[in-house]
Image (cartoon, rainbow, N blue to C red):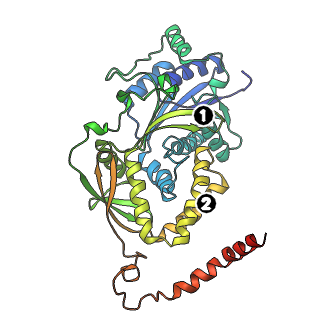
Amino acid sequence: MSKKVNKIVLAYSGGLDTSVILHWLKENYSSEVITFTADIGQEHNSNQVKSKAKKTGASKIIIEDLKDEFISQYVFPMFRANAVYEGEYLLGTSIARPLISKRLVEIAAAEGADTISHGSTGKGNDQIRFELGAYSLNPQIKIIAPWREWEYTSRTHLVEYCKRHQIDIETNGDDDRPSYSMDENILHTSYEGGELEDPSTPAPENIWKKTQSVENTPNKKEELKIDFRNGDPIAVNDTEMSPAQIFSFLNKIAGNHGIGRVDIVENRSTGMKSRGCYETPGGTLLLKAHRAIESITLDKEVAHLKDEIMPRYSKLIYDGLWWSPEREAIQALIDNTQKRVTGEIVLSVFKGNISIVSRKSNLSLYDSNLVTFEDDDSAFNQADAEGFIKINSLRLRLNAINKKKN
């Protein structure tokens, strides 16, 4: 290997890829390897992760509960922008990478390591997200991406590697879901690979973890109220909760009613198209509620400006540019717009659908006296509309006259 390293911090999940990578790094770089596992709401057993990392040769094992930081410092800012990539993807995997990159760099500095490593493949987006994030925070950091270096070309090869080196690769025995590539956090769960690589093949029902099929959802609707302050949810059903508690609660309600599934083909940063099946139940609910509270508290042109820059903002997150100056500049604008986004939204969920029941805010710009079809007590002079229409139609009338001349 060309890189000379003294100590490595590995982003470690305990799954197949990172288990092989841990052993492979020690074997090929003869270096001390520290594992770092970010608990951002994925289903995992910390004791099992520690035991596995220790058996595979980690010199130190670090596991951190980052759920509240993940939601408050990354997910909430993203939701203030109503960010959606290519019309459907709520960026559940993308938004987790900046936090993990930050902690990898910080832990490397604290532990005297000059190198970090990750298990992302050379075809995917995550290698870009991890590394752009790391270089943004430490331009001198060294990065090892084994999938771009080693001779193994499939996960079948990794299984064979584990057998040769007696590495424990127990699979989940609690269900019969096929072995897809899965990423999970408190915001979402994603499934890729396997038979999903054929976009003409329907996603099997048994892959979904967070959401019920619509056929199995309750036959009675459920209502809930979300309180917002400065664009962020602060309470559900009049109970204040931590950021992570809010998402856990919304995930349970929305998932039970079959909300938040998407099956899409997206355009990766690397240029190829990829099919992914995503579950974002609580996030889907929150996006609907946030847009609803904005509808009564945001100025028209401010709301339209947000909608115009949202695709650009979403692409920055998707492409791993969370720490870029342009994302930070857009975020400052977004956050400024949220100063008035305070109030409460009541929603109804039923059979995969979300309906807005009511909107209330002390900062509401909605004036029922202006929009009423009844007597408005001279709040609006309807005759004023004639001048407005004539001024706005001037160029259209001139264009029509010019067309007739030619």
The answer to whether the residues at label 1 and label 2 have Cβ atoms under 8 Å apart is no
Badge number at residue 273:
1
**Residue at point 44% right, 44% down?**
66
Q: Is residue 170 above or below residue 33?
A: above
Q: Where is residue 233 in the image (x, y as percent from the top left)?
A: 38, 59
**Residue at point 57% right, 50% down?**
314
Tag 1: amino acid: Lys
Badge number at residue 144:
none
Name the one closer to the observer, 50 or 401.
401
**Residue at point 57% right, 28% down?**
119
Left or right of residue 248: residue 27: right
Tell me if residue 185 can be seen: no
**Residue at point 49% right, 59% down?**
80
Q: Where is residue 129 in the image (x, y as percent from the top left)?
A: 61, 40
The residue that disc 2 covers is: 330
Name the one closer to the observer, 128 or 163.
128
Secondary structure state at the residue bearing disc 2? helix
| Of callouts 1 and 2, the N-terminal one | 1
Secondary structure state at the residue bearing disc 1? strand
Q: In this view, does 79 lie above or below 318?
A: below
